[in-house]
Image (cartoon, rainbow, N blue to C red):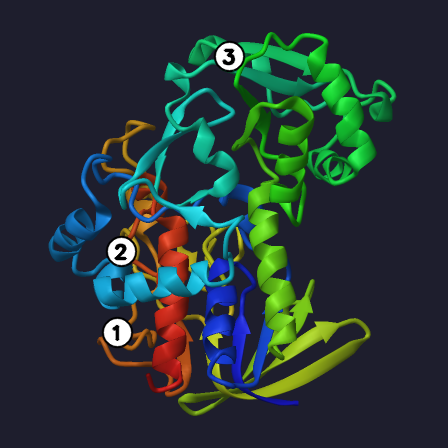
Amino acid sequence: MHFDLIVIGMGLTGLMAAKTAAERKKKVLLIGKGFGTLTLFSNTIDLMGILPEEVPVKESLPLWIEEHPDHPYGKVGMEKIEEALSSFLSFFPPPYTFQSRNGANSLVPTGAGTLRPTYLIPSTMMKGIGLREKKALIVGFKGYKDFYPHRFSDLFRCRAMTVDLEEAHGAEVSATTLARWMEEPSFRQRLTEGIKKEWKGEPLLGFPALLGLRDPMVVRRDLEKRTGASIFEIPVLPPSMPGMRIFNTFREKLIRMGVTFLLGQSVSRLLLRGDRCEGVEVAHAPLVNTYTGERILLATGRFIGGGLRADSSRIEEPLLGLPVTQPPSREGWFEEAFFASSGHPVHRAGVVVDSMFRPLNEGGKPIFENVWVAGTILAHHDSLYEKSKEGIEIATGYTAALKALGG
């Protein structure tokens, strides 16, 4: 089969690239061995968490970009960043949407008991902002080991309780299982009955972010109706149900738009001829399927997603062998202090691209005529330190797809 655009990588970068191309009536193939890091980290949408909370991002981010022109945002520009965020949000109309407070970063309480700066927040988490000034009851679940409500409540000066679930039969229960149970009205009824045994009329009820896999607003509205309280979610350890909701939404809508999904499959070889990549081979034992395309967009992420790979001495890009900018030796990968204020140099390693998002060789020239690279695989950012991961993925996935299509 032949496609206008083949996207390799099914994280948020690849999803945004596929959306951008599909909206322009292009035939798109999206290949990924998994969900990327969407289900690991993406509870909210980070744009640049190190910016001050009191200043609107539209004012502070352009100044930051001017000081960091090699950053992926420097290649995108503020106008395209705003376009990309609007494109992302178009898949999430109210009631379940993502929003900022006054156009600035906000501090969101996390399941670890910390406050985390972020930009776009799911509707289900908004009521948890400013929690220390509110009266709330925090609800946990017996058998669910990734959230400790009493520890959380001690840090945020509120009350907590743990609900014993008859469905669990005394065993451990996973986040995915709880999220599925939450979608059942009968479970919500039993949950409400359990909460009312210890509830003292607090106006807010806080839950770990498990209010369903697909439509958390239906779950929240029903629980609010049953209890009479306002309900909010608290981001917790992986897997991320809010991240899974993002993936599910993109997958359903992109399939309706005609995008071909190859989930759970990996590219085994790229078909190269001169400075062009003419297609990919996907091994699915015992078969090897070949797909050809006019354009190839690499969105394979960093180390977790397999977009970058490290051995005892070097970091490499394994699929195309693209040059990776990095410290000259392994001794330069990390600072001495684990919590170094500037982050660690290894996190700024990556593939260097031009303004068109084409990968460059050591001489600064494009390597391929029809290959583009986007997402956190790019060099000159530290999304962990900056808290910019989702913003980079959304902005570069959108912009690189536009560049690939001649926009």
Q: Quarter of the image for the C terminus: give it.
A: bottom left
Q: Is residue 35 above or below residue 405?
A: above
Near mark 3 (Cα within 10 A), the count class, few <14, some 14-19 or many ≥20, is many
Q: Alpha carbon of mark 2 to alpha carbon of mark 1: how far?
A: 13 Å
Q: Is residue 6 above or below residue 118?
A: below
Residue name at image x 67 percent, y 41 percent: 212
Q: Which residue is mark 2?
A: 380
Looking at the rendered structure, the kind of residue marked 1 is Asp
Which circle's residue, 1 or 3, is located before the other in the chain? 3
Q: Are marks 1 and 3 in contact (CB under 8 Å)?
A: no
Answer left or right for 6 relative to 72.
Answer: right
Q: Which residue is mark 1?
A: 354
Q: Nearer the viewer, residue 40 or 161?
A: 161
The quadrant holding residue 150 is top right
Q: Which residue is mark 3?
A: 153
Which circle's residue, 2 or 1, is located before the other in the chain? 1
Residue name at image x 30 percent, y 51 percent: 348
Q: Nearer the viewer, residue 74 or 231?
A: 231
Which is more foreground, mark 3 or mark 2?
3
Q: Is residue 203 above or below residue 27?
A: above
